[in-house]
Amino acid sequence: MTTSIDTANSTATPKLNKFEKLKADKDGLLVKQELEQFAQIGWEAVDETDLTHRLKWLGIFFRPVTPGKFMLRLRLPNGVLTGYKARTLAEIIQRYGEDGSADVTTRQNLQLRGILLEDIPDIFRRMHAAGLTSMQSGMDNVRNITGSPVAGLDADELIDTQGLVRKVQDMITNNGDGNPAFTNLPRKFNIAIEGGRDNSIHAEINDIAFVPAYREGVLGFNVLVGGFFSARRCEAAIPLNAWVAPDDSVVELSRAILEVYRDHGLRVNRQKARLMWLIDEWGMERFRLAVEAAYGQPLLTAAPKDEMDWDKRDHIGVHRQKQVGLNYVGLHIPVGRLQATDLFDLARLAEVYGNGELRLTVEQNVIIPNVPDSRLPMLLEEPLLQKFSIAPSALTRSLVSCTGAQFCNFALVETKQRAMALAQALDAELTLTQPVRIHWTGCPNSCGQPQVADIGLMGTKVRKDGKTVEGVDIFMGGKVGKDAHLGEKVQQGIACDDLHEVLRSLLIDNFGAQPCTREIDPGHSPAVVVVD
Ligand code: SRM
Ligand code: SF4
């Protein structure tokens, strides 16, 4: 098989970009052995490349916006954690006072803030004891692997993906210890395993998506590949024309695709290094053959259709589980931001009212599962549910926001605070009969997934009254759930100061919003308990 000149293992010596050079000089995983030393000498004395790049292999992100206060990105397979884990994380951030917080991310994961490098060895020991890892969660590694947040709870689900997601993560990270086989990918890589009918995790925007499908009467997964967002290009995943059984075949096929990507992915231009660029260059037929060779056995062709045939749910509110007498309760976490006290409270609620488990969603919210009917009324009286509502108002309910300028140096605008303020203001003055999904992202990297939103807002800089000010480009038409497709840019260069009026008009003209005739307490519309 011939490879292009733009590949890692081409016979011609490829010209390496800066990131390829730093990985060739020293694998990111190697800083694991140096953590005690880094902690002793302090962040200012750490080699700059180790500090700003290689530490990300362990999930430790230097934040130029808050030098010395690091972000720690975890891995929470399928978005599942326990009260014990949440309490461990709460204890970790609590010691940082106002600097310590946690964000639920768009990959149903948690990122901790305010972390000091000197504390990392102790933090890692605590995390290890609690069964938590942050291994390989940044840079050219596989990100948190997503699965339906109601896996194992949803009466209509097809495949409970929790075990599979954990197995794929364990294969990639060597059970959290670090796996040099997959620490030098050409670029970041996303995997999703959807077992439900409503495509609750935006399968189509992942480099590999396993989606439920019956083949000759047998339930398994069709496989999609190449979905991604970047500043340069956004693509939905396309069929690999393969079907696998819901067993270790998922792990093996993930391994095979990663090996092909690792060994042949394009490494010269970092803007063209995601998996889809390789598929483009090779064509799907050749890519599939290479995957099949790495898989070690013939791939079965795809089932004619997948089973994702529902509209997407947001899981907020009270919902019956498949287990008789049990419910899951989805709490709305405004733009995903949690303080230490919130994590302690969530852990307590999960343990007192549920079975100690918590789930995270890609909408940056939290679910408390396994709440018996008898305990539900008391849970709904808990003060935390005033802050994290089960019936938020229409715009606040579906709001998603990336980190933005508060902590991210790529950001062109502040996102989270602005997103909440605008949603609450518009909720107070408009009546909507349906939630409208507004996603904010601070720059074209699209971490806040504006292309999947009803209204996506992407940070940019605009000129207004002779000055450069914060603004947004507006995306619309993102469709999620069954027949998902990506939204497109419909307006550009709107100054954030003008956004209120622009959004108000969009909501009235396109989503049936009506100006309110009565006062509503923003963020707290009447609490209607929906039990389905
Ligand atoms: Fe992202 C880089 C935050 C989901 C596309 N992303 C970053 C960095 C690490 C940049 C940096 O060093 O500051 C951001 C960290 C800021 C901070 O301090 O929090 C960052 N990305 C996030 C999170 C936290 C957004 C959020 O608020 O939820 C999400 C963390 C997910 C996780 O738990 O691992 C996050 N990022 C995404 C997604 C959404 C998704 O995966 O569904 C995307 C688009 C999908 C994709 O990747 O195909 C995304 N992030 C990017 C990119 C563009 C990638 C590319 O191929 O060009 C970058 C920049 C890069 O990698 O060079 C980036
Ligand atoms: Fe940062 Fe841009 Fe990602 Fe937002 S979209 S977290 S601003 S890189």
Image: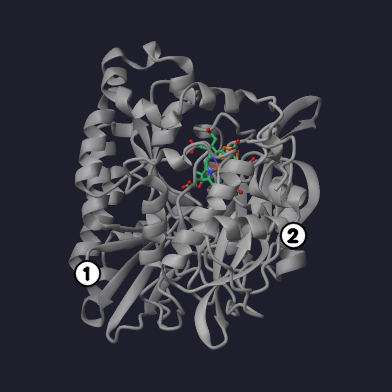
Q: Residues within 10 Å of mark 1 (few under 14, many from 20)?
A: some
The residues tagged by marks 2 and 1 sit, at their Cα atoms, a distance apart of 41 Å
Decide which of 135, 466 is in the foreground and name it.
Answer: 135
Q: Amino acid at mark 2?
A: Leu
Q: Which residue is mark 1?
A: 353
Locate residue 137: give its quadrant: top left
Q: Is mark 2 within 8 Å of ligand 2?
A: no
Q: Quadrant of ligand 1?
A: top right
Q: Is residue 198 above or below residue 230?
A: below
Decide which of 93, 299 is in the foreground and name it.
Answer: 299
Label 1 SS: helix
Q: Amino acid at mark 1?
A: Tyr
Decide which of 46, 94 is in the foreground and name it.
Answer: 46
Q: Residue at x 65, y 34 (%)?
A: 267
On residue 506, the disc is: 2
Q: Residues within 10 Å of mark 2 (few under 14, many from 20)?
A: some
Label 2 SS: helix
Q: Quadrant of the C terminus?
A: bottom left
Is 169 left, or right, of 467 in this rendering? left
Label 2 vs 1, first from the N-terminus: 1
Q: Using the rendered image of the protein, determine whether residue 386 is visible from the camera's viewpoint.
A: yes
Q: Residue at x 44, y 21 (%)?
A: 50
Is 243 left, or right, of 318 in this rendering? right
In the rendering, at what x and y percent does residue 27 appear?
Answer: 45, 28
Q: Residue at x 41, y 72 (%)?
A: 317
Q: Using the rendered image of the protein, determine whether residue 521 is visible from the camera's viewpoint.
A: no
Is 395 left, or right, of 515 in this rendering? left
In the rendering, at what x and y percent does residue 86 appear?
Answer: 27, 51
